[in-house]
Image (cartoon, grey):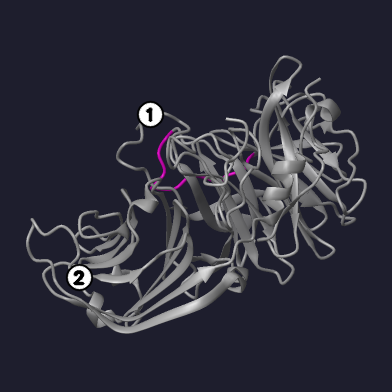
Amino acid sequence: MSTVTNAQALNYHLTHPGEDSSPGDPNAAFYLDGLYHLHYILRHPWRGAASYSFVHVTSPDMLHWSWQRTKLQPSFTGHGMFSGTGFLTKEGIPAAIYHGQASGRNHIAIAKDRRLSAWRKPYAVEPLTAEGQKPEMVHWDPDCFLVGDTYYAISGGHNPPLLRSADLCNWTYVGDFLSGDLPGTAIGEDISCPNFFPLGDKWMLLCISHPYGCRYYLGDWDAQNEQFAPEFHGRMNWRRPEQSLYAALDRDYFAPESLLAADGRRVMWAWLRSMDDKIAERSIQSLPRELWLGQDGGLRMRPLRELETLRHDRVQLDQVEVSASNSDAQLLASAPVAELDGDAYEIEILVERSQAERKRFGLQLFADETRAGLPVLFLPEYGRLRVGDTEAPFALADLPAGEDIRLRIFVDKYLVEVFVNDRQALVACDMDYRAARNLRGYSFFKPTVLRSVKIWRMKASNQGFFEARDSRIWEVDSE
């Protein structure tokens, strides 16, 4: 397959405009002088073998992306580029730390300007112990961050090591980054694609483990011991039944990266790794998510507020009653809620708390009288939310008293992302999305009243994608 066809092209998800590429990790993200910058990994041939570059895209709003010439590529670095992060030096200069393919070392590249139009030659991070010896450590997916005037770097692996530097050149091995791990994690989970940053009054470690996908820790930075003391662990990826229990990369929400927006919001992306065999090798990025801490100290997440600028042609339905399905044989909902005759929507459903208590109910996308489509269902008996064939924890009992259900569904052709009450989010895919046009309601045993159903069509933000598909400005050197 040479390029993404018009049928495969998404409307408002960031997608690579060229050949199949895996991995597609987002990397080195910045807000600089009114412009957002993001890189993502591109696999390509170089000197007769597979190698990896960082494709560079820019946007004024994190939605409308333009592709730039690829600067961070093997013909410049001398090696392929695996995951890392972007950071600002003490002088405010953008820099990237990453793992050099087959180099056995992590590397730092410092930009020559804030447009990222040129970079200084990368150099390897070569830590020493306090005694001047080379430490025994894994050199893998790195992150770099500042605490006061001190640079710290972590290197991925099962027990990430922490390094310290005053100047980004001379690095001292400190020891273990984590003060200890938490219940809810499995022995052998690695910390890869790490991104460590303050969030509210805590620190957050956003990362993956290869067996289980995107996850995070919340805790405190122990300045005296120079360690991260995690207090809570949560997951952002949820295994589908058909996915292997053993294959390390068979995960949907993967390889996260984040930045600070112009107004101080923390915004993240993740590579939508597998989703469906037909797009498994595509570099598709998730919708940008805003992250913050709620009053209870728990993580909150919602779709980027700039997505609201794409809304148009709103339709609102009030007090929609979904009649009950009380027979196991009656699998389909009794009636449609609305017809979706396009391929780019945001749908917001509000359900009063009294209607949702102990109720199995939800919606069916791409459905009709004979096709159940893609379900979005609340399962109180399991305390879970189901989207497609993926289930994630979500229990009404965990919400504050009186808080109603707010469900936001983003439809971008075959790709669906669902957010509920700023507390949970899932992704799903239905490559047969054109098979049926209805949005249908489902309610088991008792009817459910949807207080409001708001449906917006979404404008496309993909003009830059089509321009880059034609110009191939991102094309990298093969020699």
In-image side of 200 versus 232 (left or right) = right
The residue carrying mark 1 is: 246
Who comes first in sequence, dot 1 or dot 2?
1
In this orientation, which residue lies closer to the viewer: 3 or 318? 3
Task: Give residue 442's quadrant in the image.
Answer: bottom left
Would you place residue 61 above or below residue 236 in this image? Answer: below
Foreground mark, 1 or 2, reads 2
Q: Secondary structure at mark 2?
A: loop
Residue type at tag 2? Lys
In this orientation, which residue lies closer to the viewer: 71 or 124? 71
- Residue 143 visible? The answer is no
In-image side of 306 versus 116 (left or right) = left
Quarter occupied by the N terminus? top right
Quarter occupied by the C terminus? top right
Q: Residue at x 52, y 36 (%)?
A: 190
User: Magenta span: helix, strand or loop, mainly?
Assistant: loop
Whether residue 182 is in magenta: the answer is yes
The residue carrying mark 2 is: 359
Identify the disc placed on residue 41.
none
Q: Which residues are magenta?
A: 176-187
For disc 1, the neighbor class at 10 Å (few under 14, some 14 to 19, many from 20) is few
Q: Residue at x 45, y 58 (%)?
A: 417
Whether residue 5 is in magenta: the answer is no
Residue type at tag 1? Tyr
Q: Give residue 473's position: percent from left, percent from top.
A: 79, 41
Q: Give residue 415's position: percent from left, percent from top.
A: 46, 52
Q: Give residue 283's position: percent from left, percent from top.
A: 59, 41
In-image side of 403 versus 355 (left or right) = right
